[in-house]
Image: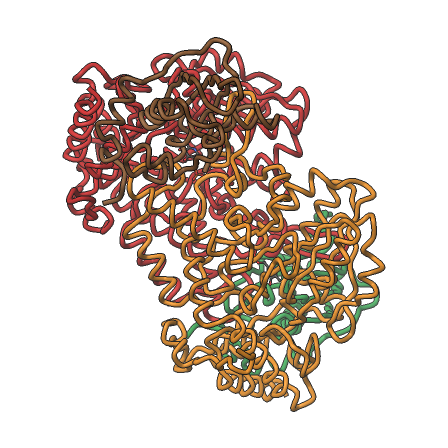
Chain colours: A red, B orange, C brown, D green
Amino acid sequence: MGQTDIEPLDVAAIREEYPILRREFGGEQLVYLDNAATTQTPDRVVDTIAHYYRHTNANVHRGLHQLSQEASIAYEEAHDRVAEFIGASGGREEIVFTKNTTESENLVAYAWGLNELGPGDEVVLTEMEHHASLVTWQQICKKTGATCRYIEVEEDGTLDMDHARELIGDDTAMVNVVHVSNTLGTVNPVSELADIAHDHGAYIFVDGAQSVPNRPVDVEAIDADFLAFSGHKMAGPTGIGVLYGKKHILEEMEPYLYGGMMINKVTFEDSTWHDLPWKFEAGTPVICQGIALAEACDYLDDIGMEAIRRHENELAQYTIEQLDGEGDIDILGPPAGVERGGLVSFNLNSVHAHDLSSILNDSAVAIRAGDHCTQPLHDKLGVPASARASFYVYNSREEVDKLIEAIDDARQLFA
Amino acid sequence: MGQTDIEPLDVAAIREEYPILRREFGGEQLVYLDNAATTQTPDRVVDTIAHYYRHTNANVHRGLHQLSQEASIAYEEAHDRVAEFIGASGGREEIVFTKNTTESENLVAYAWGLNELGPGDEVVLTEMEHHASLVTWQQICKKTGATCRYIEVEEDGTLDMDHARELIGDDTAMVNVVHVSNTLGTVNPVSELADIAHDHGAYIFVDGAQSVPNRPVDVEAIDADFLAFSGHKMAGPTGIGVLYGKKHILEEMEPYLYGGMMINKVTFEDSTWHDLPWKFEAGTPVICQGIALAEACDYLDDIGMEAIRRHENELAQYTIEQLDGEGDIDILGPPAGVERGGLVSFNLNSVHAHDLSSILNDSAVAIRAGDHCTQPLHDKLGVPASARASFYVYNSREEVDKLIEAIDDARQLFA
Amino acid sequence: MGIGGSDMYRQQILDHYKNPRNTGELENPTFTHVGENPMCGDEIRMDVVLSEDEETIERVAFRGDGCAISQASASMLSERLHGMAVDELRELDRDDIVDMLGVDISPMRIKCAVLAEKVAQDGADIYFDELDIDRTTTED
Amino acid sequence: MGIGGSDMYRQQILDHYKNPRNTGELENPTFTHVGENPMCGDEIRMDVVLSEDEETIERVAFRGDGCAISQASASMLSERLHGMAVDELRELDRDDIVDMLGVDISPMRIKCAVLAEKVAQDGADIYFDELDIDRTTTED
Ligand SMILES: Cc1ncc(COP(=O)(O)O)c(C=O)c1O
Ligand SMILES: Cc1ncc(COP(=O)(O)O)c(C=O)c1O
């Protein structure tokens, strides 16, 4: 089946499952374009959550009663489902549920970084890393005496791959790279970076927070050692993140959080650890959230990840075209025509991003304004903040048109 | 108003809000007595969750659009509500949302323990600590060279307070004590232990996982420096825990997880931290779970925490009386008549706890069997496992009677 | 619908944003202080000259960069501070600033609105009480 | 309703639990191995004597402590192993054990059921392949 057989999304049908999109503010219907921050949750995922609490809620792993068995099996199988979603052939043993992408980054930074890094070791990041990885590795490097280095971002929003090859060397222990930039929209060549990292015996950690939700991601095709993403950015609930790790690496890693469920044998003097992935899930886990995330994976696969990728890129390209008109808008990241994630960050010359977002809110157009958790990148670009419109499966061109109109209102107001 | 004015719980009315309690297995109606593992979730909390996703779901803290404002305010106020629930006059600044009690313990162990403990320092625990605190402090002590010491548990399930006074000395940096034991049901004298700890300049961490759900807890009356508990054990959702900390202590503590939201200013070289409590909540937080937990607090306060305490103790006492009859059952913890949390752990001489739980499941009676995450305590008591029946607001004496009948069936089967 | 949006940008605010009053620096200010709103990137620097008895504000100037709310608030405050008793400045609170702006400020923008006030107050506190504040930052 | 409960405790299992066969120790066993199920506290120790050509199991004895499923499974397995080819032992799997027990085993109890089998197999593996297994533990 060729690529051309992929149907565009039936946005009208998809929207049916999202009552929140029918909300009105001041008589205007909500135009929700803040999906890179968090996506909305379709009825079938909300129903899964409510059904869980109303019918099978129980603690997992150890209970011998029926409810606990049901909850345990559903929770364990959720790991398998997520493994399948990202092409992890090792199944549940390679999937750790955390509370968000940020915790997934910290898990590796604490469990691996704090134990393995030392003076002389280098962690290579990119200038477009999100604070989730940038601050984490920066601080773990400070604790261990290792050094952080940053691959430069070019004018056109892409990574300087020559610089990458220069930075990644035999002292490199870890390369952490964002798959799709949440500020620039850039799709980074993670598989090429994985090869470079592996050539030098380094691990590669792919921040998939903005890629797993909106394109097919296959960890084994990329050859990622670690991949992190969040449920709340992919039609799932808040309070769950995922850490994928290659089995042999996770096996060798020390645990991270200590407590119940993650142990094997405990005495007053010492403890031994449970098998993967439970070794990394201490305490009562994010049971309902895990089960709901598996449902979100089903939901997204039913729509089709390749179709979602196209939809997102098309909306982004359309937005860039429409924004370009007046010549008073700077667009961050790759120019029109270059594939990107479903988001566009920009600045309207005369209007501060925060003012713009406040004014757009009057027309019920919800965008984000700020540094999008990439302060150092904004500093480099010489802007304190930017406005960002970001899309998901339920967004349409008509909504982009409303965005453009609302921007025009702001332009008038500040003229 | 005297204590005697407190009405017993209207269990029949309460049960209306729990459709899961109407489930039947093999024609028998579920008797859910595994509440110390996790409690069931009333409709109003489930409705709060569903309403959140269907009406106000958005990322918090930074969004200037209406939805984000609604979600932000609700999420921030949830901290205030939880502060009020446990008598923390500092409000939201003293309340950190984590994913469970276990993470709350680890937060302090990592952010305070790893930085402050060293050889010669001592962490004093009790022999009845849950793995959440026992394994955590044990492992942090191993990393830092500090030493763990354990206050002994007496025959009658109480702490040996002379031993406590002996162990807690000027080398003690932290005392971690479980408020209500999840295995023995013992209610520990945490306020007395706090005084002893403070006399020696040590902090006291109270594990409130089994106390906050079922009795009035006032952190300031106890004078606890830290208190931890879990949403899923108090009619709230999975995926949320709470760490209470005295403001001045939290202020001095280093951060724990790094990433977005918890920062103030970030450069490629270094970062500074946000105010309390956000400094300890990295990444997109447990938004919906926090809002639902606040609803659970409202729910419990509507019933009345003092009434819940009585209800729980009465069911536990009634269970002990009923179990005592045949003389072939060993009950763990305080003897009949001594106030305890709403749980009873026991062993039927002729039947292994796992077999008992499996057989009880036939009568749709759900109890827990195992070590209840207190392996070292079980080792000390000389039993590999125990059976545990634990109660919540919706349990009745009739359900205890069904438990007793089902135990009798097991007794016959194994006779 | 909630507060925010163009309600927040009534004529007066836009006017002060587009034509800020009292911008620039003062020679020999009695005190000078700088503040920022790191999340937004708003920055304000305020120079204040007091009367000889140090009880009254004689002149104020500010420089800044940031959103319309933060900059208009600084401009309007600079006008109000003129001739104000120092004690009065030190007692200003969030409500006074909202009153001064004459519009409802959405909760998320309050820190933009109060930045200038905090800078002026912290400047006075440092000067009179020798407080150890390096740079003012407004957070929630 | 799900599997588990008294379905799992049919006559045969209870009989083997109450009257376990082949308990105790063997003199000069060809190999001995110990295993446990730490979460449950089940423990099994198995002694095995092989034929001279080391191809057939001649005698088996076990000692153990734990739930009815784990102990009955050990007792029943000890009977079956009698005269079994070593190769056959090494190929036994979870399904064989469930067949042997003749009841459905709930997923949470599988590790109890297979403990004895794992102990016998690991004992053989250590003996023949000089594997470095100290103590067998069954986890999911
Ligand atoms: C006394 C006690 N402490 C800590 C915990 C751990 O709670 P959680 O599993 O929610 O982290 C529990 C519950 O299992 C408990 O009973
Ligand atoms: C690229 C990227 N990485 C990491 C994160 C952090 O995700 P979370 O806030 O769910 O931990 C985000 C989202 O904010 C992101 O866009």
Of residue B89 and residue A15, the one placed in the foreground of this image is: B89
The furthest residue to the right: B166
Q: Residue at x 63, y 52 (%)?
A: B226
Q: Quadrant of the N terminus of chain A?
A: top left
Q: Hey, which residue is sitting farthest top in the picture?
A: C27
| Residue that sits furthest to the bottom in the current view | B325
Residue at 24% over, 32% down = A359
User: Residue B207: which quarter of the image?
Assistant: bottom right
**Left or right of residue B204: residue D88:** left
Q: Is residue B71 above or below residue A214?
A: below
Residue sitting nearer the eye, A257 or D140 = A257
- Measured as percent of width and height from the top left, residue C136 is found at 50, 27
* Quadrant of the rendered image holding ligand 2: top left
Residue B300 appears at what percent x and percent y?
Answer: 46, 67
Residue A257 in view in this figure: no
Look at the picture and state if D10 lies above or below B281. below
Q: Quadrant of the C terminus of chain A?
A: top left
Does A65 appear above or below B220? below
Place of residue A42 in the rendered image (x, y in percent of width and height, measured from the top left): 28, 50
On the image, which quarter does residue C71 sit in?
top left
Q: Is residue C8 left or right of residue A402?
A: right
Residue A26 in sight from this viewpoint: yes
